[in-house]
Image (cartoon, grey):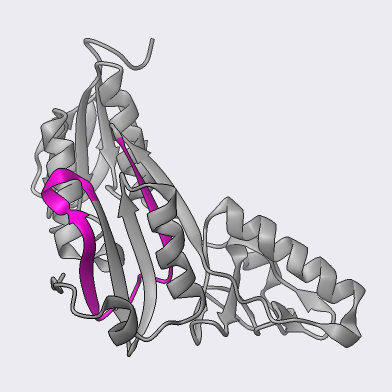
Amino acid sequence: DRLGPGRRLVVVGAGFLGAEAAAVASGLGTEVTLLEPAPVPLAPAVGERVGRMLTRAHHDHGVDLRTGVMVAEVADGGVRLSDGTLVEADEVLVAIGSVPNTGWLEGSGLALGDGLECDEYSAAAPDVYGAGDVARWHNPLFGTAMRIEHRTNATEQGMAVARNLLSPEARKPFAPVPYFWSDQYDFRIQAHGWLRGHEEVAVVEGALEDRKFLAAYRSGDRVAGVLAVGMPPKAVRTWRQAVATRAAWRDAVGELVREGA
């Protein structure tokens, strides 16, 4: 009864969670307003051109996406913006990300930052390991520290930590290719690798305007990630392998047309 025809929902935050919620609610006939402070949703992660494609998808499905706006408070009758505007709503969903719960570890001597700081083995100290959303560890495959809020990573990291605990003399670094997916409207987004901090994006198959494409992401001289929308599994697997082997960008992309993002 809270969602459906005649009901109004405001979603604060147009990241993947907020976008999925907006898509589902819109499909149920709800009048949806999606509020996002950034000029282009998800641009730091997926690039500006892909972000604009996702923006058009919201508009095409009747969602009122408002970018570059700041929320001051959840008020009676809706959400009040920083300029005083009241966006009316029957229900409000806040999807602005999470903060790792490390307060209980303060004073423990463990390094805390954006989560529990761990090495490539997911170890924070001798015989102390971290796994899941709370662990920020050094992924040697990409040469950077990362903290991933996806259930697939939590499962894989937990298993890796268990192996290292049971066989301390044969520990192995935890070096996965991060993966997530997002179902929105009539398409599925799949991403492999580490897209944040990318330096270049190349649409290597399909076309953005068709919402059926595959984009490769470069960091340094290597393929760092791939994002696919509406593409068959075989095409995605080929590029995931390029990410997993840290393929040279020049060799993987070749003479394909590069499109900046």
Quadrant where the N terminus lies? top left
Report the residue at 53% width, 55% height from top. Answer: 150
Q: How many marks?
A: 0
In screen coordinates, is 97 left or right of 209?
A: right
Q: Write the start and end of the magenta stretch as one range.
A: 187-212
Q: Which residue occupies the foreground of this view, 66 or 71?
A: 66
In screen coordinates, is 184 left or right of 102?
A: left
Magenta stretch: residue 142 in it? Answer: no
> Majority secondary structure of the magenta segment?
strand
Above-or-below relation of 6 to 159 = above
Residue 38 shows in the view: no
Magenta stretch: residue 211 in it? Answer: yes
In screen coordinates, is 8 left or right of 2?
A: left
Residue 117: image location, x then y, percent: 61, 80
Quadrant where the C terminus lies? bottom left
Residue 67 shows in the view: yes
